[in-house]
Image (tube, rainbow, N blue to C red):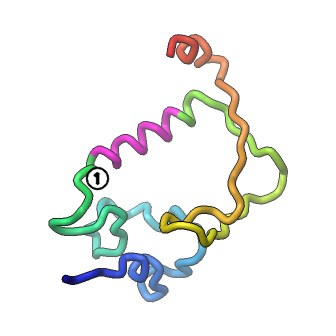
Amino acid sequence: MLLVNVWGIQNDPNIWGDPKTFKPERFKGIEDYRDGFRFMPFGFGRRSCPGEGMSMRLVGLGLGSLIQCFEWERTSESEVDMSEGTEGISMPKAINLVAICHPRSTMLNLLSQL
């Protein structure tokens, strides 16, 4: 059995400049996980996630809907702490992000029908 350390690949400073810093723009030119095997969120090969195609479409749809339908604001003026927690395998945030959302006035009619 071959086990690949995907966390090690995705946190390798030889592949990613400053891998511990949150920089979402570093993934801008990557179209899929086969682009040099640098980013593999769904695994690779025969045992990769079968729901990859659906999830890649639904995450964008869900995020776009949240941005379109709601106004978002922070509960405090302090910077968002992006440090990682230690619990679990999904790398949760050390301090949870708390935000307030209000429906946009143009979306009230649509949201009231749901």
Q: Nearer the viewer, residue 18 or 40?
A: 40
Local secondary structure at mark 1: helix
The residue at 50%/41% (across/down) is 63
Give the residue type at disc 1. Answer: Glu
The residue at 36%/81% (across/down) is 5
Most distant residue in the bottom direction: 14
Most distant residue in the left direction: 46
The residue at 34%/43% (across/down) is 57
Q: In which quarter of the image is the N terminus?
A: bottom left
On screen, residue 75 above or below 47: above
* Res. 3 image quadrant: bottom left
Q: Position of residue 67 (x, y in %)?
A: 57, 36
Q: Where is residue 7 in the image (x, y as percent from the top left)?
A: 42, 77
Horizontal side of 62 relative to 82 (left or right) equals left
Q: Position of residue 96 (x, y in %)?
A: 69, 55
The residue at 37%/41% (across/down) is 58
Question: Does 64 lie within the magenta span?
Answer: yes
Q: Nearer the viewer, residue 107 or 88?
A: 88
On screen, residue 31 above or below 76: below
**Circle 1 residue:** 52
Q: Where is residue 105 in the image (x, y as percent from the top left)?
A: 66, 18
* Chain part drawn in magenta: 54-65
On screen, residue 28 above or below 104: below
User: What is the chief secondary structure element of the magenta stretch?
Assistant: helix
How many numbered discs sit on the rendered protein?
1
On screen, residue 4 above or below 64: below
Callout 1 crowding tier (Cα within 10 Å): few <14, some 14–19, many ≥20: few
Question: Does 16 lie within the magenta span?
Answer: no
Horizontal side of 34 relative to 16 (left or right) equals left
